[in-house]
Image: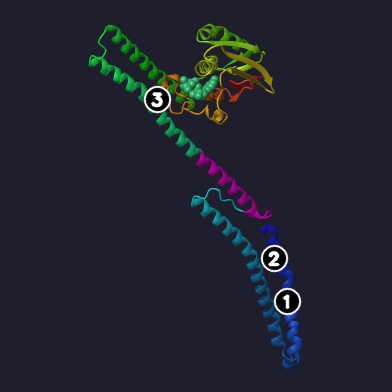
């Protein structure tokens, strides 16, 4: 029952109970002592009784009813105070159990809602902190590996280990290659952090997805055929989407590069299918490689995640490609996910909202 209703009921009860109790006590005194005290002869006593008794009974009734009423309020406040104490002691999973139907119900529900939010925020902060540590560990490792090689090759040249001009050329070529690896990682990292903090300008234009994919494939297919990957569009639709063309191509290239690196080394294939999916276009890009172990599928979009956990082959990549793709697609209000295709191979699924003309 709400406290408002209880106060209202208490007041009504006070008005009803006071005359009843007063009359009962007065009647009892009259019956018991009326004869002895000769009330009929002692008018002032009677007047005194008829004045004091209702007041005493009124105050007592009010006191008892107020106590009952406030017990309820104090209990609810105690429950809330316990909740606040638990949360401030760090027990963020604590939730208040509360009865429905009084004013505290809403406060307790808000308190629980706040506790849920706080819990989520703390978890998010912890996960960000974990990611930050992984990011720093990933950058340090991926930069240190080529740097160590560069140092070793320079040392080799200085100490005359590379004695012949051919050897020296080989050493210098390797140094150049390792420097390019470092440059690639730094560029990827720079792009990732810019997109991640929302500082990267997106040039959004309404584009026909079918035409755009055909153009992308025809401009890239020669290059990828040489690298051992045959790209084809097997199903397509013409729907308008709002994209930054350069960044969208960047996503497609990241996916094709992965199929080259981690897919089949001979007769590699990447098949694109575009379908309508509710208010979205669904773009599936499936290769014919070995795919990704099921338990790792959810991680491949994480920053610096690489299937090669020991990072023994740094030249294969830095683990930023799909994290960048995920940020880009997110900025286009779409989603990107991965699954293993029935016939093996990795399938990347992109959903982009269809741009409705107003
Ligand atoms: N087509 C694929 N087939 C099998 N494994 C894949 C494929 N694409 C990605 N992966 C796995 O997912 C991991 C993450 O891919 P991602 O593109 O983010 O990083 P990367 O290719 O290692 O580095 P980067 O793209 O920065 O050069 C890869 O290391 C690989 O293990
Ligand atoms: Mg990649």
Q: In this orientation, does residue 324 appear?
A: no
**Mark 2, residues whose alpha carbon is within 10 Å: few (<14), some, or many (≥20)?**
many
User: Is residue 334 positioned above or below 104 on the image?
Assistant: above
Residue occupying the point 73% across, 76% down = 21
Q: CA distance from mark 2 to mark 3?
A: 75 Å
Q: Mark 2 — residue?
A: 10
Tell me if mark 1 has few (under 14), some (14-19) or many (20+) residues whose alpha carbon lies within 10 angstroms of its own: some
- Residue 231's place in the image compared with 57, above or below, is above
The residue pinned by badge 3 equals 142
The one of 110 and 284 positioned closer to us in this rendering: 284
Task: Tell me the quarter of the image containing the C terminus.
Answer: top right
Task: Determine which quarter of the picture holds residue 231.
Answer: top right
Q: What is the CA distance from the residue labelled 2 to the residue labelled 1?
A: 15 Å
User: Which residue occupies 72% across, 69% down?
Assistant: 15
Secondary structure mostly seen in the magenta stretch: helix
Whether the magenta-drawn stretch holds residue 201 is answered as no
Residue 272 visible in the snapshot = yes
Q: What x and y, as percent, mark residue 290?
A: 56, 21
Kindly indicate the quadrant of the structure image that contains residue 133: top left
Q: Earlier in the sequence, mark 2 or mark 3?
A: 2
Helix, strand or loop at label 2? It is helix
Q: Position of residue 42 (x, y in %)?
A: 72, 90
Q: Nearer the viewer, residue 142 or 217?
A: 142
Q: In which quadrant is the N terminus drawn?
A: bottom right
Q: Percent x, y for residue 251?
A: 53, 18
Which residue, given by chain and number where applicable, does mark 1 sit on? 21
Magenta segment, which residues? Answer: 97-123
């Amino acid at each position: 029952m709400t406290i408002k209703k209880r106060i209202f009921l208490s007041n009504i009860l006070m008005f009803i109970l006071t005359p009843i109790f007063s009359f009962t006590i007065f009647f009892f005194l009259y019956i018991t002592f009326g004869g002895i005290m000769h009330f009929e002869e002692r008018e002032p006593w009677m007047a005194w009784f008829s004045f004091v008794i209702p007041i005493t009974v009124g105050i007592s009734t009010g006191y008892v009813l107020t106590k009952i009423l406030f017990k309820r309020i104090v209990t609810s406040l105690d429950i809330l105070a316990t909740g606040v104490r638990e949360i401030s002691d760090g027990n963020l999973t604590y939730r208040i159990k509360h009865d429905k139907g009084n004013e505290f119900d809403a406060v307790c529900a808000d308190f629980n809602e706040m506790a849920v939010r706080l819990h989520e925020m703390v978890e998010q902060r912890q996960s960000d902190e974990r990611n930050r540590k992984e990011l720093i560990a990933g950058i340090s490792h991926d930069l240190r590996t080529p740097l160590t090689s560069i140092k070793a090759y320079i040392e080799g040249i200085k100490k005359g280990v590379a004695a012949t001009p051919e050897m020296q050329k080989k050493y210098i070529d390797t140094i150049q290659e390792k420097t390019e690896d470092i440059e690639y990682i730094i560029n990827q990292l720079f792009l990732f952090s810019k997109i991640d903090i929302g500082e990267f300008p997106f040039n959004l234009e309404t584009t026909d997805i079918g035409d755009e994919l055909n153009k992308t494939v025809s401009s890239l297919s020669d290059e990828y055929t040489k690298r051992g990957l045959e790209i084809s569009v097997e199903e397509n639709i013409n729907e308008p989407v709002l994209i930054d063309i350069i960044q969208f191509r960047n996503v497609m290239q990241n996916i094709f590069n992965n199929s080259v690196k981690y897919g089949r080394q001979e007769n590699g294939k990447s098949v694109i299918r575009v379908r309508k999916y509710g208010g979205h276009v669904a773009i599936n890009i499936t290769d014919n490689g070995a795919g990704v172990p099921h338990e790792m599928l959810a991680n491949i979009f994480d920053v610096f995640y690489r299937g090669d956990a020991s990072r023994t082959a740094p030249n294969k990549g830095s683990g930023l490609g799909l994290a960048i793709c995920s940020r880009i697609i997110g900025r286009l209000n779409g989603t990107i996910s991965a699954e293993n295709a029935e016939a093996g191979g990795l399938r990347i699924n992109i959903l982009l909202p269809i741009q409705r003309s107003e």
